[in-house]
Image (cartoon, rainbow, N blue to C red):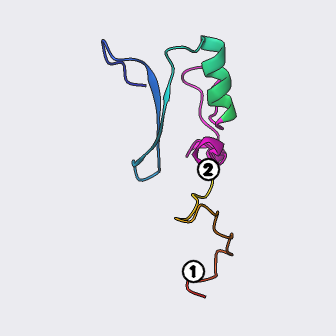
Amino acid sequence: MKHLPGADPELVLLSHQYKELERIPLSDMTREEINQLVQELGFYRKETPDAPVPEEFQFAPAKPLPILLHPQAPTADGKTPPKRDKEEHPDL
């Protein structure tokens, strides 16, 4: 957490390469809602400030971020393109 005086509070999610993934405004959320959001995102909450973080949570969030999964955009004709297998080349 980085406190910026005068700035609206927001949760900034970064990739392991420090690329910004998402910004979530926190101004209208209660402490309980923020705690629930962070837990749903897969972050680990330590019992005490000096407690160690388990290895499986070292690169939190440990879960995929559902808020980052955007539906596939429609094509120019307004139709949604068919889903392809990961291995399938788009030109095939």
Q: Position of residue 2 (x, y in %)?
A: 37, 24
Q: Which residue is mark 2?
A: 69
Q: Which residue is mark 1?
A: 90
Given contact means CB atoms under 8 Å apart, are the residues at marks 1 and 2 in contact? no
Q: Amino acid at mark 1?
A: Pro
Instruction: Characterize the local packing of mark 2: few (<14), some (14-19) or many (20 or more) Cα atoms within 10 angstroms.
Output: few
Residue drawn at x 51%, y 20% is 26
Q: Main secondary structure of the magenta part?
A: loop
The segment highlighted magenta reads 41-68
Farthest left residue in view:
5
Instruction: Characterize the local packing of mark 1: few (<14), some (14-19) or many (20 or more) Cα atoms within 10 angstroms.
Output: few
The one of 67 and 37 positioned closer to us in this rendering: 67
Horizontal side, residue 59 vs residue 40: left or right: left
SS at circle 1:
loop
The one of 42 and 25 positioned closer to us in this rendering: 25
The one of 82 and 62 positioned closer to us in this rendering: 82
Q: Position of residue 23 (x, y in %)?
A: 46, 34
Q: Position of residue 42 (x, y in %)?
A: 66, 38
Q: Earlier in the sequence, mark 1 or mark 2?
A: 2
Measured in 3D between alpha carbons, the distance from the residue under mark 1 to the one under mark 2, in whole angstroms, is 20 Å
Horizontal side, residue 25 vs residue 85: left or right: left
Q: Amino acid at mark 2?
A: Leu
